[in-house]
Amino acid sequence: MLSPKKVKYRKMMKGHRAGKATRGNYVSFGDFGLQATQDGWLTGRQLEAGRIAISRSIKRGGKVWCRVFPQKSITKKAAETRMGSGKGNPEYWVCVIKPGQVLFEMNGVTREQAESAFKLAAYKLPMQTRVIARE
């Protein structure tokens, strides 16, 4: 599962999701990209499931880039623990996604292949997405 090697603070605040992505909102490495149209949290497992779906769809045809990485820890208290006594331990890691952020990119394939691969990956993700091409 994806997680950072080292972080300054293990337990993070919940934060708030407002506004659109101002960075990482265009295709920079490949020819086609999968762009989020909603905000949300994307777990490392969901990200890996999407990457595997794309890789299996295009086989050895092209190259895939993952443009996001889980850097926010989500904590959880142990089962049957009374309330209080501090914040729980980190359970898993998520990426904070804003609308407009590019999640995956690929090149070396046709537009039809890219759209079908991204459609399979979109089923694995908890937010609405769209396919974009490099300008």
Image (cartoon, rainbow, N blue to C red):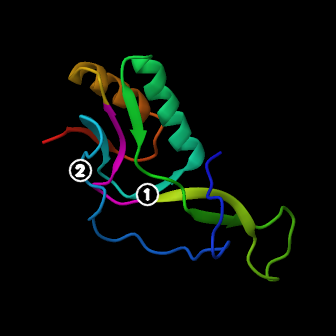
Magenta segment, principal secondary structure? strand
Left or right of 135 on screen, residue 25: right
Q: Is residue 39 above or below residue 19?
A: above
Quick one: SS at disc 2? loop
Q: Quadrant of residue 110?
A: top left
In which quarter of the view is residue 54 placed? Answer: top left
The location of residue 8, given as percent across then percent down, is 63, 75
Residue at 29% x, 62% y: name it: 23
Q: Quarter holding the N terminus?
A: top right
| Image mark for residue 120 | none
Label 2: which residue?
A: 26
53 relative position to 30: left or right: right
Magenta span includes 47: no
Residue at (35, 31) in percent of width and height:
118
Amino acid, disc 2: Tyr
Q: What is the span of residues highlighted in magenta in the rendered image?
A: 97-106
Q: Position of residue 82 (x, y in %)?
A: 85, 75
Q: Amino acid at mark 1?
A: Gly
Residue at figure coordinates x 44%, y 16% from the top left: 59
| Apparent side of residue 70 relative to residue 5 in the rendered image (left or right) | left
User: Circle 2: is it few (<14), some (14-19), or many (20+) Cα within 10 Å?
Assistant: many
Coordinates of residue 100 in the picture (x, y in percent): 27, 55
* Residue sitting nearer the eye, 47 or 37: 47
Q: Identify the image quadrant of the C terminus.
A: top left
Callout 1 secondary element:
strand
Give how far apart the Cα atoms at labels 1 and 2 are: 18 Å
The residue identified by callout 1 is 40
Residue 20, x across and y down, in percent: 27, 64
